[in-house]
Image: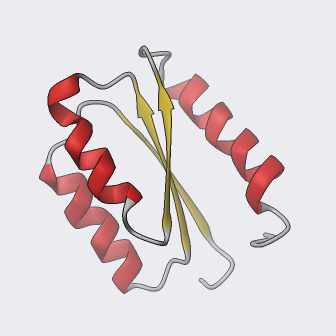
Amino acid sequence: MEKSVIIIPSMNPDERLIDYVKELIAHQFPKIIILDDGSCQETKDFFTTLQSFPECTVLTHAVNMGKGRALKDAFNYYFLKIQKIFPV
């Protein structure tokens, strides 16, 4: 798992997303990319909390672009920024 990267597209999450990410971290996943896909303002604090975890990177779409676009953008981020650090 030391080379695994988790990608999570999310829109308007609740506290369960934070619990899930904490569980992934406890299972020693070293890198988690979370994409906020146009969430409402009321849920932004969840993403701020997740960004504070060293294992997490939070990317943001200003408006909802759909799960497919969220995954593509997260994969693109991985290939441009992380692949050299966490090659699969």
Percent coordinates x, y for residue 19 in the rendering: 20, 65
Q: Nearer the viewer, residue 76 or 88?
A: 76
| Left/right of residue 11 with respect to residue 66 in the rendered view | left
**Count of numbered marks:** 0
Who's the residue at 63% across and 72% down the image? 4
Which quarter shows the N terminus?
bottom right
Q: Is residue 1 left or right of residue 50?
A: right
Q: Is residue 36 left or right of residue 86?
A: left
Model colouring: secondary structure
Residue appearing at x 42%, y 16% in the figure:
64
Depth check, front residue: 12 or 53? 53
At a point 25% along the width and 36% down the height, the residue shown is 44
Q: In this picture, is 47 found above or below 52?
A: above
Quarter assignment of residue 74: top right
In which quadrant will I find the C terminus?
A: bottom right
Q: Position of residue 20 (x, y in %)?
A: 27, 64
Instruction: Decide: is 76 above or below 26.
Output: above
- On screen, residue 36 above or below 1: above
Is residue 79 left or right of 60 when viewed as pictured?
right
Q: For the point 47% across and 85% down, which residue is it?
A: 28
User: Residue 57 at what x, y percent from top left?
Assistant: 52, 55
Q: Quadrant of residue 18?
A: bottom left
Residue in the foreground of this view, choosing between 12 and 59: 59
Vertical relation: 42 (above or below) 17: above
